[in-house]
Image: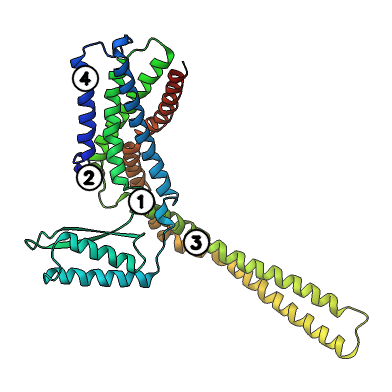
Amino acid sequence: MNLGIYRSWHAIVALAVAGGLFAWHVLEPLPFGSRDDGNVDYLLTTGWIAVACYVVLALYAVRRAAHRLALSPEFAWKAQLPALERAQSELVGLQQRALRREVAGAAAMQREAKGILARNGVQRVLRVCVARDPQALGLWRLVVTPRQPLGTLAGWLHAHLYYGFAAAAIVWFHGGGRCGTSMGLLLNVLSYAVLGTGFVGAILWTFGPTWLTRAERELSVEKAFALREHYARKLAEAIAFPQTKAKDAADAAAAAKVAAEAAAKAAENPALAGKELEAAKKAAKKTADDLKKAETKAEQAAASIAAETERLQPEIATLRGQADAVTREAARLGFWRALLRGWRIVHVPCSVALLALVAVHVLSIWYY
């Protein structure tokens, strides 16, 4: 189970923000969504915080797209392999010195590690942090990771999840579920559609891998799909093999016939005489012989195709059975995978529509 998503500092921040706004409401009790003058500050605060949450949710999608399309800055940052190898070697040396207690303290190790990266020109692609060594009391170890200037996808996922839930609560604080206008109705419907599908997505993210692993009997999803394509290709090749041999022989016979006709026509040229005529006749005879051989070979190939097909039937039947079994397994696992991803069909379009309506709502309030 993916329980790591529930251990996040973003959850603490989201809970603190939502809890603080709820405490404000308790201290100055007015109905949620009240338009009284005394509630203006609360409305503005909850509104802008909700907008900030929605911006974070949108930035998560932008971060994913940037990584998927290789637009994130780290894809443009390159370092020469020798420089990376030198830096790695020096970092290993620094770790050994730390084990011998020649370098004392995390700050000193961090300072030297940064100097190594800068000296080798790889500070833009690698980052080094110092952590306590769990195997040796009082010692530190270096942890080298690639730089991700836009943040890790895991961190953005945590922010997306918890600030999304916080936004749902803040939207209620802000509007109180008022649906008196079409804009209010749409904002509430979309907000809680996104919240509901997001909650389902969080549950599936937590338990889905376990369910999918249980559904995978002898084949994983990826292996089943790969084998399905493999067997389909091999089955098509086995069925086409005898026809391919016959077609090749027929094509050779057709080419030989064209060559024989051309050579015979050349031998009948009245302008030829002497050695040229003799050579043309020899060429015509040779091509005629080649034509007979090719036609015989084509007839033999055509005659043997039935026997070849009959010989291959057991192998084709076995291959077809294997292909059918893999296809059924791939369809079953594909259903499970589609089921685990189905919530996105509602979540993503509703999120896009919600962000657009939030922008319209903010601009309209600002304007009026």
Q: Nearer the viewer, mark 3 or mark 2?
A: 2
Q: Nearer the viewer, residue 50 or 245?
A: 50
Rendered image: mark on residue 149: 1
Tally of numbered discs: 4
> Disc 3 vs disc 2: Cβ atoms closer than 8 Å?
no
Residue 71 pos. (x, y %): 45, 50
Rendered image: mark on residue 309: 3
Residue visible at 93% across and 80% down?
270
Distance between the Cα atoms at labels 2 and 4? 47 Å
> Disc 1 vs disc 2: Cβ atoms closer than 8 Å?
no
Side (left or right) of 259 relative to 20? right
Residue 121 pos. (x, y %): 36, 66
Q: Nearer the viewer, residue 37 or 355?
A: 37
Rendered image: mark on residue 214: 2
Residue that extends furthest to the right in the rendered view of this protein: 271
Residue picked out by circle 4: 24
Residue visible at 43% across and 18% down?
365
Distance between the Cα atoms at labels 1 and 2? 37 Å
Q: Nearer the viewer, residue 269 or 14?
A: 14
Residue visible at 39% across and 33% down?
348
